[in-house]
Image (tube, rainbow, N blue to C red):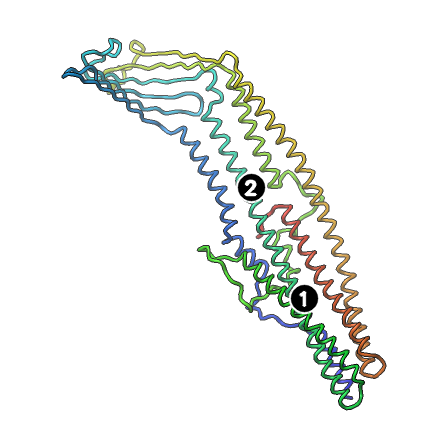
Amino acid sequence: MKQIVFSIFLCFSLNISAQQPVDSILTLSEYLGYVKAFHPIVKQANLIVNESELKLLKSRGAFDPKIEVDYDRKKFKNTEYYDKLNATFKIPTWYGVEFKGNFEENEGVYLNPEATLPDDGLYSVGVSIDIAKGLIMNERMNMLKQAKLFVKQAEMDRQLLVNDILFQASVTYFNWLKAYNEKQVFDDFVENASFRFNGVKKSYEVGERAAIDTTEARIALNDRRLNLEKARINYIKASLDLSNYLWLDNNVPIELQDNITPDVNTRVQIDAVLSTSEFDMATFNIDTHPKMLSLNYKYEGLDIERRFASNNLLPRVNLEYNFLSETPEIINSFNTANYKSGLNISMPLFLRKERAAIKLANLKMQDTEFEIEATKVTLKNKISAIDQELDSFQVQNVYNNDIVTDYEKLLSAEERKFFLGESSIFLVNSRESKLIDAKLKAINLEYKFFETKAKLFNVLSTLPF
């Protein structure tokens, strides 16, 4: 009767699972939330967008109004040779047009006759136009257009970098969960082996078992303890690896406490957390992938650079016209009777610099085209391979669960036979070892499944929640 009760209790202890206090569980969602919000590399990735926005602001500065003041004076041996003041206010616009207002005041004994002005100075209002090279495309327009594209490209690059760090953090969490589950398995089987050893020892003491059975049971117990110690060290190392990704808002790293454990039900929420639940290979549009968008923005920027280089083949024809007046407060005083105009034309004879710039821009665009096509094929193949691998894991998981269930039945039956005197401790230990191996394979299979889910998340380059 005592043996039967012992056997029933042993089978019950074999299947019981340790319960986790709810307040000590760190879920995948909470963990990635910390990483996304506070990890230094994520913050560093955000600097890419900040940098691009500052470059955009810098390029917009080329259209800022400008004030220029030019003052020259020469006095020698009590003679004022000249005293010249030239103040200009300029307003650049999108196309190669620049509006400006000007005030000049000159005096002195040795002034150039053309610099002689009325006593109260001379005012002018006019416009400067580059009617060839700078009208349709100029450097200001080129810089601003490329800066706008760079902001969009930087946003995609930031998403790729953040996704990559979250992928690494996810794999670390899954490894932590794997180490925890392995430790729990050996915890349970050390308890079972210890209970069996004490039972066999008592049976030996009352003459029901041979001395060699206690040796066999003790070997099994020490083997389970050895494996538990290895699992414990692996769990500690995995916990420390996980701590590398946990930070507070003020850049203070967090040390994971011993009472914090992973969520053993991660499988239920992994798709929702990694945003892979709605993925469908048949309807997935590769052109919306952040990497593809980043390359397309890069290509558009190179196209703007090429058009700007082509525009430089045109001559520079700068036309300037200014209305002159002594009394700017009277609007009618600005008329075509009083004006100052000018025309400036310049053009390199051989255009070697300009032609080389066009060819370089074309080469860069061609290189980016090759990169776009290669990246598209690579992404498609990676996603397809991961999708098929996940389907295979579903099948493997069914088989492995059946194997674990059958080994549990075999062990339970062998234990009953042992305590009825129809089996040996060697066979019980052998059955138990097979069950341990099957459970460890199940844990490793789950880890590989989670890792592949993380790879899908990484190759899709989405951001969680």
207 relative to 242 in the view: left or right: right
**Relative height, residue 276 to residue 10 (above, below):** above
Most extreme residue toward the left is: 78
| Mark 2 vs 1, N-terminal side | 2
**Viewer-proximal residue among 351 and 320:** 351
Whether residues under marks 2 and 1 lie with C-beta atoms below 8 angstroms apart, the answer is no
**Which quarter of the figure is the N terminus placed in?**
bottom right
Say which mark, if any, is on residue 342. Answer: none
Residue 56, position as x, y percentages in the image: 46, 35
- Which residue is pictured at 77% across the width and 58% down the height? 396
Q: Which residue is under mark 2?
A: 157
Residue reaching furthest to the bottom:
206
Does 272 appear above or below 282?
A: below
Where residue 405 sits: x, y (%)? 77, 68
Instruction: State the residue lying farthest toward the right.
Output: 422
The amino acid type of the residue labelled 1 equals Glu
Query: Which is nearer the eye, 251 or 139?
Result: 251
Which of the 4 quarters of the picture holds residue 179?
Answer: bottom right
* Crowd around label 2: few <14 · some 14–19 · many ≥20 (10 Å): many
Question: How dense is the environment of label 1, judged by Cα within 10 Å: few (below 14), some, or many (20 and up)?
Answer: many
User: Residue 19 location, x and y as percent?
Assistant: 63, 72
Label 2 and label 1: CA atoms lie apart by: 38 Å
Q: Measured from the top left, where is residue 131 in percent x and y? A: 45, 15
Q: Which element is circle 1 on?
A: helix
Please tell me whether residue 417 is drawn above or below residue 331 in the rendered image: below
Which residue is disc 1 drawn over?
A: 182
Residue beneath the point at 52% across and 49% down? 42
- Circle 2 — which element? helix
Badge 2 amino acid: Asp
